[in-house]
Image (cartoon, rainbow, N blue to C red):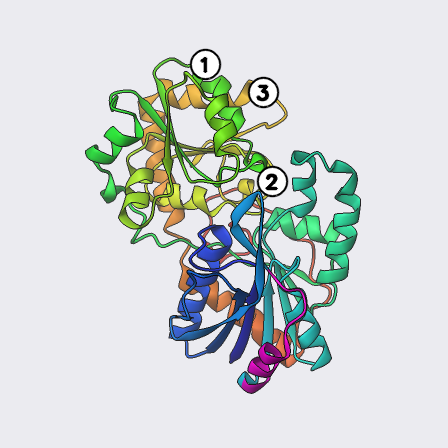
Amino acid sequence: MRIALATETFLPHVDGIVTRLTQTIKHLRRMGDEVLILAPRRPDAPAEFEGARIVAIPSMTLPQYRDVYLGMPALPWSIQHAVERFKPDLVHVASPAFTGLGAIMWARTHKVPLVESYHVQYAAYMQHYRLGALASFVWWYTRQVHNRADLNLATSLPMVRDLRAHGIKTARHWRAGVDATRFTPAKRSPAMRERLSGGAPGNFVIVCVARLAVEKEIDRLAPVLRALPGVRLALVGDGPDRARLQQVFAGLPVQFMGMLHGDDLVAAYASADLFVLPSSTETLGLVALEAMAAGVPAVVANRGGLPDLVIDGQTGYLFNPDDPADLTTRVLALMDSTPTRDTMATTARQHAERFAWAQTTRQLRGYYQQVLQGTLDQASPTPTHDATLSPAGSDGAGE
């Protein structure tokens, strides 16, 4: 197949969307497909990835978030001609909000089959930016954008149900993946643990890998540190909320690690005792799956896409984000019981090994082929989640 893939964000930016897309492109190319990437222009961007050309869309940055580039919502003629010369069989727009609009319009105008995928809960973000009154408008806008697609993909079963509940048609589940050969307990490092713990490796070390932004709700971890002496927190990532968070955590045992890449990132996961992600707005939360692949139990919010990854009581715990004390309770339970933590670590690793990017990409190609052949089942039932250790290839497996 020849696939034009438009995205709101791409390399060298790093987040869950980029991780999924780079792995998808890599495996599509290995399976013999041609890919053309459309992404916002940035000065440090590569010209190609895995043999797929990257076409840069003119862009601008946000004053408060310099690492985010917004591409023009309408494709310039030169880019439209580049897409026409590529002759895509199908257009896939990831997380359409602004940049992707031009690709959507091009696909509809040229009657090329269109797939869109949902990666960001923009409506849920409104509350965190004191714009809650706009949530209804954001859902209306989301419907206008996504209902132009022949197929909509969501990265977790809860998000599939959410899209359908808000009137978005043809929503299907695009399963998660993780590179379990890269993220492994074998990468545990005494030197990295020394860094994560701020020189106190004998303490209980929590790692949180996240963008430092208000919607990640990292503030929730401050009461945990105050209530549990002997706990150390390492925040891996960067973002516009870093300065404020440094004030929130002033005087507490927290290490701001900044962005980590490659072996350092893998070692950061594997060298901690526990992974915690306090955000309640994740469409999936691939970082939790990476932590589990590294043999670390995960404590995450029982909301959004995260319950589709973490099996409560088996690979970690789901905490109630509406109960301020519940996160502390869950952390304490694992801090106090090394046998429970070790059992969960083993189970988490086994669970993560069931999610392979090659398998996830084969599922995606199957969706593409259904769209191209006109065989997509329009009456697909609303999916449910069976919270058991089932293979990733089964209908009940969560992302």
Whether residue 398 can be seen here = no
**Picture quadrant of residue 89:** bottom right
Residue pointed to by mark 1: 226
Q: Which element is circle 3 on?
A: loop
Residue lying at 74% horizontally and 49% vertically, measured from the top left: 138
Q: Amino acid at mark 3?
A: Pro
Q: What residue is shown at x 64% (from left), y 71% (from top)?
A: 103
Q: Which residue is mark 3?
A: 324
How far from the left and from the top, in percent, is residue 136?
79, 45
Q: Amino acid at mark 1?
A: Arg
* Tag of residue 296: none
Nearer-N-terminus badge (3/2): 2
Residue 383 at x, y = what percent?
A: 64, 52
* Highlighted range, magenta: 71-85
Cα–Cα gap, marks 1 and 3? 13 Å
Q: Which residue is mark 2?
A: 281
User: Residue 351, percent across and down?
Assistant: 40, 46
Mark nearer the N terminus (1 vs 3)? 1
Check whether the beta carbons of the residues at disc 3 and disc 2 lie within 8 A of each other.
no
Of all residues, the one furthest to the left in this rendering is: 190
How many tags in the picture? 3
Secondary structure state at the residue bearing disc 2? loop
| Three-letter amino acid code of the residue under disc 2 | Thr
